[in-house]
Amino acid sequence: MEDTSFLMDDPEIVKEFLTESGDHLEDVESQILQLEENPENIDIINTIFRPIHSMKGSAGFLGLKDLGTVSHELETLLDEARKGNLKITPQIIEILYEGLDILKKLRELVAKKVEKIDVSGELVDYDPVIIKIKAVLSHPETTESAPSKPLHLGEVLVEKGEITEEDLDKVLEEQEKLQHKKLGEIIVEKGIASKESVDSALKTLPVATTPASDTVKVDIQKIDSLVNLVGELVIANALIKDILESTTNTSNKNISHLGKIVKDIQDQVMSIRMVPIKPTFQKMSRLVRDVSKKAGKKVKLEVSGEETELDKSVIEAIGDPLVHIIRNSIDHGIEPEEERIAAGKPASGHVYLDAFHKGGSILIEIKDDGRGLKKDKILKKAIEKGIINENATLNDQQIFGLIFAPGFSTADKITDISGRGVGMDVVKKNIERLRGKVDVFSEEEKGTKISIKLPLTMAIIDGMIVQVGEQKYIIPMLSIEESIRPKKEDMSTIQQRGELINVRGDVLPMVRLHQLYNVEPKKHDPWEALILIVESEGQRCGILVDDLIGQQQIVIKSLGEQFRNVKGVSGSAILGDGRVGLILDVGGIMNLALN
């Protein structure tokens, strides 16, 4: 293992290299996928060459010999391909992927060393990929279909008869002295060819696909600090509003204006943390390619909604659940080619990955056109494992939800790719930790759809403040369908099921918050109080409260480790009167009160 102790002399430069190289490797991975589809596209080869060349230079500057060696060999391979001396074959694609994975591992080792993590036992053997590259370069497959070397501007002008070879040599000598000047500019300035001729020649050249970036990289800790300060500003604004609400109309107008400014600042600051989901989706393209090859199936991934933006912390946490779900879709959802053809389906399976906004949340959907989930098999397995009672009556949604039970699997044999159900409980827990929820929809022989609903941000929610006795609680607006004051005849009580409310023909269970939290209410009778109709995971119920205080943007504060697992409560917030209000988890309340 190479000695990299010198990295700690200037860790800031190394961290910058890690960020930059991470971006480069993500770009390269997505471009190799495109090159596999279009092996003769010189633009794509050039787009892969540039970041590898840049990484080689940075690694050399930092003295990272291993990274520099692998980057150099990959750069040589790509240079031969872009010159037209090497045809891009499936073998070359595999070498590029292997080299990319090696670079990722070497970069990860550097990252661990910067974090002062002991990596003495971790070795990355890159000799096999270097041997493969050298073997290919010593016996290149030169065929007529190999991509031709792209012409430069000067060569195009010579071919068109606009300038002579001698003129071009003189201009190139001049350009070497004036490196900041473009070839076309020198040709026009010297009067060797007209601007129109140069412009016409430029149009025949391949256009660079990497646009200039208008972004500035900012340390995430600075952004988090800014988010916290804006959170305090929101709280301070709510406190002032509460105190001055009873004063003159002029004051109210000014407070309202201040509130609007604070809201605008808050929205802008929160948007800084928002990043597109595209890089995460790109990783899934590589995953589908690798897993389908390993499973011996033809599977195509179709992606949409890549530009949908999510909070950075949510993006980082959603990668693993997506990997697990997609692996399951390919390994157990998509049938082998012969089985698909026999069922009248296309030979290639399809996995669809989509992200879009819906009602203030982000929805990520993973669909496949495979064999679907078998309800009878799931029920039988769940009864065998004692997860449900033999006499239980469950709807489709509840049956499919059983795959998220710990250790549940319907797989006849466990493969090294996945086992549908094994680990799906971890998927659900990870999504719920992000204050999201996951639903499964499936049709036998048609396919399965898994829908993940996530909040836009982890820091702020729109909440309805409700009053019960002297206490105030916050219920997330996403969970609320409507608020009603029922008539006396709409209420009924059934033994073992508690109180029920009739809402336009739908009979729903009713939860009394004051009973759950041992609070003395001001109103005991539902027809004198208010009922909020709420929904969670396909279930609905009514929550009885004394009154609604109003809707407000709530800055979420953690309850700390001590109260992490309090059921029915997901966090807390400082309200306008300076008191702490509990943020209620509607799903948790239903489980507490109705089960």
Image (cartoon, rainbow, N blue to C red):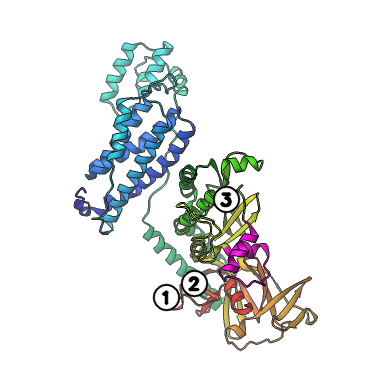
Q: Position of residue 160 (x, y in %)?
A: 43, 12
**Label 1: element kind:** helix
Q: Position of residue 423 (x, y in %)?
A: 48, 61
Q: Earlier in the sequence, mark 2 or mark 1?
A: 2
Residue 532 figure quarter? bottom right
**Label 3: element kind:** helix
Q: Residue at x 38, y 50 (%)?
A: 217
Residue 345 seen anywhere in this rendered image of the structure: no
As for residue 386 lying within the magenta part, the answer is yes
Observer-nearest of 483 and 568: 568
- Tell me the number on the disc at residue 561: 1
Q: Earlier in the sequence, mark 3 or mark 2?
A: 2
| Circle 2 residue | 235
Q: Position of residue 136 (x, y in %)?
A: 33, 29
In the image, is residue 463 above or below residue 49? below
Q: Which residues are magenta?
A: 373-402
Q: CA distance from mark 1 to mark 3?
A: 39 Å
